[in-house]
C-alpha cells in the first residue's frame, strides 16, 4: 500500500465516521421527540402515543393530548432548536467569532422589544390577526435589527468586527428600550411580557410550526449549497478570496438566511438562549469544520438540545411546566462548559 | 506575451498606493520578484493583480483582461498565496487543499468529489514533499509548514499565474531554498510566477527579473545585475551597499550602512 493509498483510506474512514455521527444526531433528535411525546402530567404510554400518531382508534382524551397539546410542542421544539443552531453555526463562521449567535447579536433582544411593543403598547402590524400580533411584531423587530447589521456590514465592506460591535450595541439599546416599555406597563401586561421573554413552547400552534418549517425549508438548501464556501472562510477571508470567493457577498447572503431563521424562531417561542451557541459548538466537536457535515450536524444537535430541554421543562418540577428558555440556560450551560473544558479549545 | 500590467492604480482612502504603474510584460517561464522598501506598494500590487483589490487600469493574462473574467475563472487561472495565513482551523491539510480546490468552483468549473478530489490533493501534496502532513490539522502546523501548505493551496488548481506574497518570511534557510527553487521550477513549466520578497539576497539569487518599486511607482525592472546597483539601492532604500558580481552572472548585495543622503531619509520618514 502506498503512502497515498494510506491517506485515502484514512480520509475515507474519517468521512464515514462523520456521516455516522450526523446520522446518529438525527436519530437522537427523533428519539428525543418521542420522549417529549410520552412525558407530561397525564402519563400516556409510548404504545398509545404511537397508536394515536398512526391514526388508530384511541380514546378521545389521548387524541386531544397528543395532537393538540404534545405534538405541537414537540415539533416546535425540534424546529426552533434546528433553526437557532443552524443560524448560530453560519453566524459563527461568517463573523469568524465563536460567540456569535442570535442572542449575542441583539436579535433576540430586538424581538423581545417588538413583543413588548405589542403586549404593552398594543401596537401591532395592521391586518394581522390579534393572535399573531406578538409574533408578527417580534419578527419585524428582529428583521430590523438584522437589517441594521447588514447595513453596517455593507458600509464597511463586509468586515466582521463592525457587525459584532453593532450587534452588541443593538442588544443594549433594545434591552434599554424594553426596560422602558416594562416601566410603563400595567401589571397584567408586564407579567405577560416577562413570561414571553423567558421563552416558552406552551403557545405552540400548527400555523406557527408551518411558518417556521417553511422558513427552514427555504433557507436550508442555500445553506447546504454554501457549505464549501463557508468551510473556505475558516481558512481566513483573504485566502478564501484567493480561492475565488466573493467573501462580502457570501457574508451578506448568509446573514440574510441567518436573520430569517433566527427572527422566525424567536418570534414563535420568545427568547431562547444557548441553543444557537452550544448547538454548533457541540456539532463541531463531533464532526469538525467541514460544513458539509457541520451544518446538518448543527441542525440536528440544536433540535436534540431543544427537544431535551422541552422534556426537562416538564419533568424538572413535577406538575409545573417551566419556561423552556430558563431550562436551556440552566441545564444546558453546565453540560456545555463541561464539554468545552474537556476539549480545551472553543474553535 | 503573457502577463501585462498597464496604467494600474490602487487607492486606499485618499492616498494612491499604486499610481499609474505600467510594467514590462512578464513572459511565461519567468520567475519575477517584486522588491522595494516598506510601504512601496509591493503587496498591494500583487493583490491588485490577483483581483483582490479594486483597481483601475489593465491586468491581462494571455490577452484576457482579468477584471472582466468571472471571479471563478479568474481564481482558476490565478493562484494567490497571501502573506498572512490563517492557522486556527481544525481542518486537516488535505481537507484545506480540497476546500481550496472546490470553494471557488473546482478544477474545470466543477467540484471534484470524494476520492477523486482527495487523490488530486494528495498528488499535489506529494509533489511539494508534504504528504506526511496530509492528515495533520492546520492548527497544529508550524509557521514554516503553514507557508509550505500555502504554496500547495495556491497551486491546487494548476494556475497559469502564481502570485506569492512574502512566501519565505517564516522559513529557515533550507526551506527557503526549497520553496524558491520550487517557485522557479513552477515558472519553467510554463507559468508566470511572481513573488514579493524583502530579502534582496534571495531576490538576487533566484529571480530572473526584479521589479523594484518605490512609493507606488516603478524604480527599475530587469535582471538582478542590472537593477541592483549601489546608486539605485542608495536612492530607493537609503543604504550604502556594495554589489559583488559572482559566477553565472549572479550578484550579491552587502549593506555597509545607511546613506548620508538626507533627501532619501526625508523620503523614508
Image (tube, coloured by chain):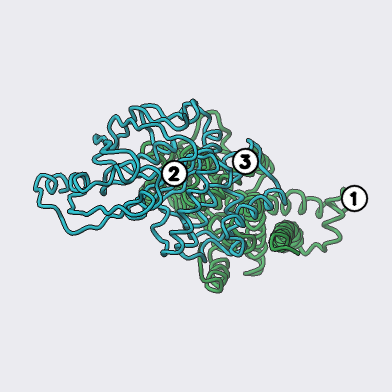
Chain colours: A green, B cyan
Task: Kindly identify the residue that appears in the image at 55 percent across and 28 percent down.
Answer: A127
- The front one of B110 and B180 is B180
Q: Residues within 10 Å of mark 3 (few under 14, many from 20)?
A: many
Select label 3 or label 1 by which is in front. 3
For marks 1 and 2, give the CA distance.
Answer: 77 Å
Task: Kindly identify the residue that appears in the image at 61 percent across and 52 percent down.
Answer: B124
User: Going by the image, does A165 lie left or right of A239?
Assistant: left
Disc 3 element = loop
- The front one of B29 and B17 is B29
Disc 1 element = loop
User: Going by the image, does A200 lie left or right of A62?
Assistant: left
Q: Earlier in the sequence, mark 2 or mark 3?
A: 2
Q: Position of residue A209 (x, y in %)?
A: 66, 44
Which residue was labeled with disc 3? B106
CB within 8 Å, label 2 to label 3: no
- The front one of A160 and B92 is B92
Task: Kindly identify the residue that appears in the image at 48 percent across and 48 percent down.
Answer: B184
Which residue was labeled with disc 2? B31
| Residue B47, picture quadrant | top left
Which residue was labeled with disc 1? A56
User: Going by the image, does A346 lie left or right of B211?
Assistant: right
Disc 2 element = strand
Residue A40 is at least partly visible in this image: no
Residue B242's disc is none
The chain that hosts pointer 3 is B
Q: Is residue B99 above or below residue B74?
A: below
Q: Position of residue B157 (x, y in %)?
A: 58, 43
Farthest-out residue, front: B247
Amino acid at each position: 500500500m502506498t503512502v497515498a493509498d494510506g491517506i485515502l483510506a484514512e480520509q475515507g474512514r474519517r468521512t464515514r465516521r462523520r456521516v455516522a455521527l450526523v446520522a446518529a444526531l438525527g436519530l437522537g433528535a427523533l428519539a428525543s421527540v418521542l420522549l417529549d411525546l410520552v412525558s407530561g402530567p397525564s402519563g400516556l404510554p409510548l404504545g398509545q402515543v404511537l397508536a394515536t400518531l398512526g391514526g388508530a382508534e384511541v380514546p378521545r382524551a389521548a387524541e386531544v393530548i397528543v395532537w393538540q397539546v404534545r405534538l405541537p410542542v414537540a415539533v416546535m421544539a425540534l424546529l426552533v432548536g434546528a433553526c437557532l443552531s443552524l443560524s448560530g453555526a453560519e453566524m459563527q463562521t461568517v463573523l469568524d467569532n465563536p460567540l456569535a449567535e442570535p442572542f449575542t447579536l441583539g436579535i433576540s433582544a430586538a424581538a423581545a422589544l417588538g413583543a413588548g411593543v405589542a403586549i404593552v403598547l398594543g401596537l401591532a402590524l395592521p391586518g394581522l390577526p390579534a393572535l399573531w400580533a406578538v409574533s408578527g411584531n417580534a419578527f419585524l423587530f428582529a428583521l430590523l435589527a438584522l437589517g441594521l447589521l447588514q447595513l453596517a456590514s455593507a458600509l464597511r465592506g463586509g468586515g466582521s468586527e463592525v457587525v459584532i460591535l453593532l450587534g452588541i450595541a443593538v442588544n443594549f439599546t433594545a434591552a434599554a428600550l424594553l426596560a422602558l416599555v416594562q416601566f410603563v406597563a400595567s401589571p397584567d401586561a408586564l407579567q405577560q411580557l416577562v413570561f414571553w421573554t423567558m421563552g416558552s413552547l406552551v403557545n405552540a400552534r400548527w400555523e406557527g410550526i408551518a411558518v417556521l418549517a417553511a422558513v427552514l425549508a427555504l433557507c436550508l438548501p442555500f445553506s447546504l449549497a454554501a457549505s464549501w464556501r463557508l468551510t473556505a472562510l475558516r481558512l481566513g477571508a483573504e485566502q478564501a478570496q484567493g480561492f475565488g470567493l466573493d467573501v462580502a457577498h457570501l457574508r451578506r447572503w448568509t446573514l440574510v438566511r441567518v436573520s430569517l431563521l433566527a427572527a422566525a424562531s424567536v418570534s414563535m417561542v420568545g427568547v431562547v438562549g444557548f441553543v444557537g451557541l452550544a448547538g454548533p459548538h457541540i456539532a463541531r466537536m463531533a464532526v469538525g469544520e467541514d460544513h458539509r457535515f457541520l451544518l446538518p450536524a448543527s441542525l440536528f444537535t440544536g433540535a436534540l438540545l431543544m427537544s431535551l430541554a422541552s422534556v426537562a421543562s416538564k419533568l424538572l418540577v413535577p406538575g409545573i411546566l417551566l419556561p423552556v428558555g430558563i431550562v436551556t440556560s440552566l441545564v444546558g450551560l453546565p453540560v456545555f462548559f463541561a464539554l468545552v473544558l474537556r476539549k480545551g479549545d472553543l474553535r | 506575451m503573457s502577463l501585462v500590467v498597464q496604467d494600474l492604480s490602487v487607492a486606499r482612502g485618499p492616498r494612491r498606493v499604486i499610481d499609474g504603474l505600467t510594467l514590462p510584460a512578464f513572459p511565461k517561464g519567468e520567475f519575477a520578484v517584486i522588491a522595494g522598501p516598506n510601504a512601496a506598494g509591493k503587496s498591494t500590487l500583487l493583490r491588485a493583480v490577483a483581483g483582490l483589490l479594486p483597481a483601475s487600469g489593465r491586468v491581462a493574462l494571455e490577452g484576457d483582461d482579468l477584471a472582466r473574467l468571472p471571479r471563478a475563472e479568474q481564481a482558476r487561472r490565478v493562484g494567490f498565496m497571501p502573506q498572512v495565513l490563517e492557522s486556527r482551523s481544525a481542518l486537516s491539510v488535505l481537507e484545506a487543499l480540497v476546500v481550496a480546490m472546490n470553494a471557488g468552483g473546482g478544477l474545470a468549473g466543477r467540484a471534484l468529489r470524494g476520492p477523486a478530489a482527495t487523490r488530486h490533493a494528495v498528488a499535489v501534496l506529494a509533489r511539494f514533499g508534504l504528504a506526511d502532513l496530509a492528515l495533520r490539522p492546520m492548527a497544529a502546523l508550524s509557521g514554516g509548514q503553514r507557508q509550505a501548505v500555502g504554496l500547495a493551496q495556491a497551486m491546487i488548481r494548476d494556475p497559469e499565474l502564481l502570485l506569492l506574497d512574502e512566501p519565505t518570511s517564516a522559513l529557515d534557510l533550507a526551506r527557503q531554498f526549497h520553496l524558491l527553487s520550487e517557485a522557479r521550477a513552477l515558472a519553467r513549466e510554463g507559468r508566470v510566477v511572481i513573488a514579493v520578497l524583502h530579502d534582496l539576497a534571495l531576490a538576487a539569487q533566484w529571480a530572473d527579473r526584479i521589479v523594484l518599486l518605490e512609493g507606488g511607482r516603478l524604480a527599475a525592472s530587469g535582471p538582478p545585475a542590472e537593477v541592483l546597483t549601489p546608486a539605485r539601492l542608495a536612492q530607493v532604500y537609503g543604504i550604502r551597499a556594495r554589489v559583488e558580481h559572482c559566477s553565472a552572472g549572479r550578484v550579491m548585495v552587502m549593506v555597509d550602512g545607511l546613506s548620508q543622503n538626507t533627501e532619501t531619509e526625508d523620503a523614508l520618514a
